Image (spheres, helix red, strand yellow):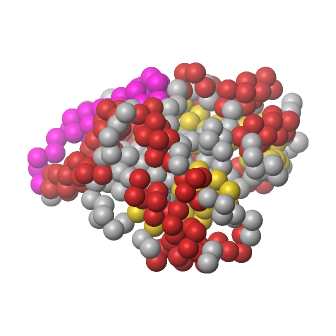
Amino acid sequence: MIDCQRHRFSIPDSVHYLNCAYMSPLLTSVQEAGIAGVRRKAQPWEIVGDDFYTPSEELRAMAAKLVNASADAVALIPAASYGAAIAGAAVPLRRGQNVVMPAEEFPSVVYVWRERCRRSGAEVRTVPRPEDSAFPSRRWTERLLDAIDENTAAVALTIVHWTDGTAFDLQAIGDRARDVGAAFILDGTQSVGAMPFDFQEVRPDFFYCAGYKWCLGPYSLGFAVVGERFMDAEPIEYNWIVRKDSNDFARLVDYRDEYQPGARRFDVGERSNFILVPMLTESLRQIMEWTPEGIQQYCTKLTEGLSGMLGDSPYIVTRPGETGAHLFGIRTPDPELLPGIQQELNRRGVHVSLRGTAIRVSPHVYNTAADMAALAEALIAALR
């Protein structure tokens, strides 16, 4: 199993950072890659035409390897909302159809489909969280399956729920979507990098992931993977670099209708960012060395004693197996206590998030047993 990797980050001993689902810290090697990129951009005469392409292709290949996809199916995007927008624009919607998603979904998932449904006369069908919190994964999946019908045009959800890490049965949901001809769209931002995901096995029509959380990368760069169903869809912007033969700078005024192969047509403008691309490439390289399976194992071992540390307190920790080990929720019978609990956690240097009615805890390989003990002590102290 992976040993603690705190030495690879710039985290003071007094900080108990259990909040990677909010934003990851940067590896020191990723910081160095970014600084080198800044210095390079300071001397633009050293940047040549190939520098607009080769580093981006290296990142594309690394992202593809992480999720077991073809590099030609990967697009480089600036944000999860950009990925959601591409998918939203590609799915045809008409009056009487519906788009199915879990309740309390991440806003970037919700807003694009609300707007698309408003314009087309379709309906957003929101599936509520099950009241039984003991087995949310199975019961919520069942509710989603029941909500999908012959009028469903798209099913859109995060791989694990962003508020508390509830893991959905992606195989069952994908099979049901395919049965009715609905597009199956996944947001991997709160899982990919720390939890295994196989694009070829799950077979979504569209998948996207921001890079600044579990991919340990910089803000404003991520990636999407496009299935065959959408590969020829219209992009949401028209930039020069995704066109055929764009690497011939002398002939850029010979405008081309054809795109570069595969999903490159969906790349964001300025995708060659000379600072961010090396940073995300380095973070994915390190993740591939650890492996998402190894990160899950580390987080499982790290968190397995938390319920025991909380003793007979009224806190409810989600059962193992219902969430990813890297992201889970703790609930209290009285949600009105949450602001005071957050205040006590902050006072003790314990960093988590409040999302919905959950205290969202999201450890990584830089966390230690001392971090988990500090979390338990702060939670108990907050009730006194």
Q: Is residue 165 left or right of residue 118?
A: left
Q: Position of residue 20 (x, y in %)?
A: 45, 54
176 w.r.t. 187: above or below: above
Asked whether, in this view, residue 73 is left or right of residue 105, the answer is left
Residue 100 picture location, percent across and down: 77, 42
Observer-nearest residue: 310 or 84? Answer: 310
Q: Residue 38's image quarter?
A: bottom left
Q: Quadrant of the N terminus?
A: top left
* Helix, strand or loop: magenta stretch: helix
Question: At x 26% / y 37%, what residue is drawn?
Answer: 55
Q: Number of callouts in the render?
A: 0
Question: In what quadrant of the picture does the C terminus appear?
Answer: bottom right
Taking the spot 52% from the left edge, 69% from the top edge, the residue there is 378
Q: Is residue 371 above or below residue 56?
A: below
Per the rendered image, the range of residues in magenta is 43-72
Residue 116 seen in render: no
Q: Quadrant of residue 311?
A: bottom right
Picture coordinates of residue 18 (x, y %)?
46, 58
Q: Is residue 175 above or below residue 82?
A: above
- The answer to whether residue 102 of the structure is visible from this angle is yes
Of 78 and 264, the residue lying toward us: 78
Quarter-of-image position of residue 107 = bottom right
257 is higher (above) or lower (below) than 123: above
- Confirm whether the magenta stretch covers residue 330: no
Q: Residue at x 68, y 52 (%)?
A: 105
Q: Is residue 182 left or right of residue 328?
A: right
Give 312 or 17, whichever is nearer the viewer. 312
Q: Residue at coordinates 77% horizontally, 27% vertically from top-left?
A: 176
Magenta stretch encompasses residue 60: yes
| Residue 280 place in picture, x, y as percent | 33, 44
